[in-house]
Image: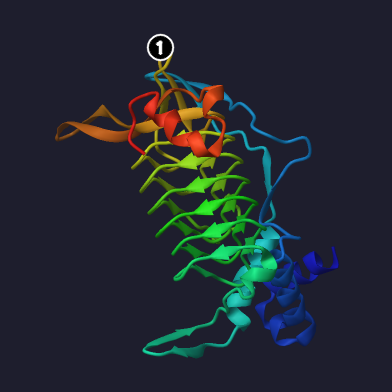
């Protein structure tokens, strides 16, 4: 609570970070985030996936996100203040040179993390034991939980929250968020499988054990339409637990005519036989979907 108070005061008056007490408080918060003892967002007590509120739209019922997560805005404030107090410096790794403010994580062996060259994670990102980083990038404020695979050229943006046993396939893009402060980070819950080149941004929540096929793109405005029943059900901002999702499109009228607009289609639910991580590809093959 003392750290929270100091960060709030420094956020209201940026001149205070020139005082060692406030600068040390900022650094202390980043250290706590780096070690996973503080998080930008965390599940609410008794949390888990919760159904969204319904609203009638032109194309039928719509379900919007009802978050089971709490966002700690003051932690994001500390991260932004940290950028302000960190000096620029040059790193030489012949023949490469880098010039930046942020330190990188070190000593992966003691963390129990496998980091393949050229995996990069910034200091202030938490990596739990048994995380595997292929050549990839994890930004400050992110939280990556146990047993998660961050595959080649996947990116985990600032403050994104990634659960246990998640697989981020090659080229997956998880969006980051620092401002506006009230904006929620992207949240990928336990056991989720994201197919190659899928993108999740703008605080979208992918609930437990869902499967996204290759090239699915989710923003807060993306229509996520469940087409597995007799009539469509539309979601915004979240993918329900255990859903199998593929890219889709729908016709939208514009002044210049009718055009296809991208959406995401829920085509079914994962079967119990695909609960094991090693058989996640089968969850897509069941529906003839590419990984």
Task: Name the image colouring.
Answer: rainbow
- Residue at point 69%, 55% (across, down): 72
- Residue 262 lies, with reference to residue 227, above or below; the image says below
Q: Residue furthest top?
A: 230
Image position of 66 (left or right of 238): right
Of the 4 image quadrants, the one containing the N terminus is bottom right
- Residue at point 63%, 46% (across, down): 164
Residue 154 image position (x, y, % from top left): 43, 57
- Residue 287 lies, with reference to residue 100, above or below; the image says above
Residue 90 image position (x, y, % from top left): 48, 90
**Could you tell me which secondary element the residue under label 1 belongs to?**
loop
Q: Is residue 237 visible?
A: no
- Residue 196 lies, with reference to residue 141, above or below; the image says above
Residue 124 image position (x, y, % from top left): 63, 69
Pointer 1: what residue?
231
- Residue at point 56%, 34% (across, down): 276
Q: Residue furthest right?
A: 2
127, 174: nearer the viewer: 127
- Residue 109 lies, with reference to residue 216, above or below; the image says below
- Residue at point 14%, 35% (across, down): 256
Q: Residue furthest front?
A: 278
Mark 1 Cα-neighbour bin, 10 Å: few <14, some 14–19, many ≥20: few
Query: Count the marks: how many?
Result: 1
């Amino acid at each position: 609570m003392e750290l929270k108070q100091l960060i709030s005061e420094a956020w209201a008056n940026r001149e205070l970070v020139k005082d060692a007490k406030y600068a040390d408080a900022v650094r202390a918060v980043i250290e706590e985030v780096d070690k996973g003892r503080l998080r930008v967002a965390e599940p609410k007590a008794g949390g888990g996936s919760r159904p969204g509120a319904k609203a009638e739209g032109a194309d039928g019922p719509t379900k919007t996100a009802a978050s089971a997560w709490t966002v700690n805005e003051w932690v994001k404030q500390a991260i932004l203040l940290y950028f302000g107090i960190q000096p620029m410096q040059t790193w030489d790794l012949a023949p490469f040179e880098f010039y930046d403010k942020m330190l990188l994580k070190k000593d992966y062996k003691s963390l129990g993390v496998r980091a393949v060259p050229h995996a990069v994670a910034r200091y202030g990102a938490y990596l739990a034991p048994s995380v595997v980083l292929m050549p990839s990038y994890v930004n400050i404020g992110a939280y990556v939980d146990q047993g998660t695979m961050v595959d080649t050229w996947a990116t985990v943006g600032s403050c994104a929250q990634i659960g246990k046993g998640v697989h981020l396939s090659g080229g997956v893009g998880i969006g980051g968020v620092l401002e506006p402060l009230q904006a929620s980070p992207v949240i990928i819950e336990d056991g989720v499988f994201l197919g190659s080149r899928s993108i999740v941004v703008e605080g979208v929540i992918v609930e437990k054990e869902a499967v996204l096929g290759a090239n699915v793109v989710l923003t807060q405005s993306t229509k996520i339409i469940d087409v597995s029943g007799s009539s469509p059900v539309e979601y915004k901002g979240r993918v329900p637990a255990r859903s199998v999702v593929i890219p889709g499109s729908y016709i939208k009228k514009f002044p210049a005519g009718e055009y296809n607009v991208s959406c995401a289609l829920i085509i079914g639910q994962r079967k119990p036989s695909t609960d094991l991580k090693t058989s996640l590809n089968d969850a897509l093959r069941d529906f003839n979907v590419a990984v």
